[in-house]
Amino acid sequence: MGNCDSGEVPKCLLLLLVLLRPLSLREVLKISGFKRLWMAQLVSILGDFLAVFGVINLITFKWHGTPLQVTNVMIAFIIPMATVGPQAGVFVDRWNVKRTMILSDLIRACSFWD
């Protein structure tokens, strides 16, 4: 039963094939750890967006900034992600995900502290 000479596929190989198939979004979201991580990342990204939106509104409406000044703020927001992101990704992949996310969010929160 299940040896290679008989032409049958071994049960362990069938199990492996089932486990290696791509998961659907619904199946992925049933994994509680992944769902928590994904939701935490969503909240973090939303916070980043609101911070940039707030700065742009401050420049535009309170300080009556020019379009060039708003563009410079957007460039200053994007350049670190584009330049540091790929190199940092090499190291971050080796670190504890939860600690890294918490630490990066704390550093960003402290950078806005007066």
Image (cartoon, grey):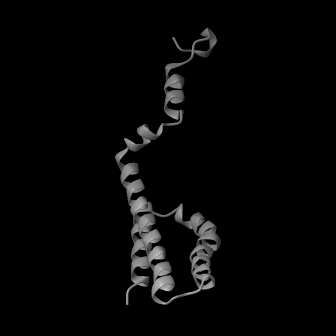
Horizontal side of 19 relative to 114 (left or right) equals right
Please state the horizontal and vertical placement of residue 25, each as a whole percent of the image: 46, 40
Please state the horizontal and vertical placement of residue 21, each as a whole percent of the image: 53, 32
Image: 33 above or below 13: below
Image: 21 above or below 28: above
Q: Nearer the viewer, residue 20 or 3?
A: 20
Horizontal side of 74 relative to 38 (left or right) equals right
Image: 85 above or below 12: below
Please give the name of the residue rendered at 43% of the width and 42% of the height, measured from the top-left corner. 28
> In the rendered image, which quarter is residue 40 located in?
bottom left
Please state the horizontal and vertical placement of residue 86, each as a whole percent of the image: 63, 66
Please give the name of the residue rendered at 63% of the width and 69% of the height, measured from the top-left corner. 87
The quadrant of the rendering that contains the C terminus is bottom left
Q: Residue furthest top?
A: 6
> In the rendered image, which quarter is residue 78 located in?
bottom right
Q: Nearer the viewer, residue 60 or 41?
A: 60
Q: Nearer the viewer, residue 101 or 49?
A: 49
Horizontal side of 29 relative to 72 (left or right) equals left
| Circle count | 0
Please state the horizontal and vertical placement of residue 71, each as a whole percent of the image: 61, 79
Image: 112 above or below 3: below
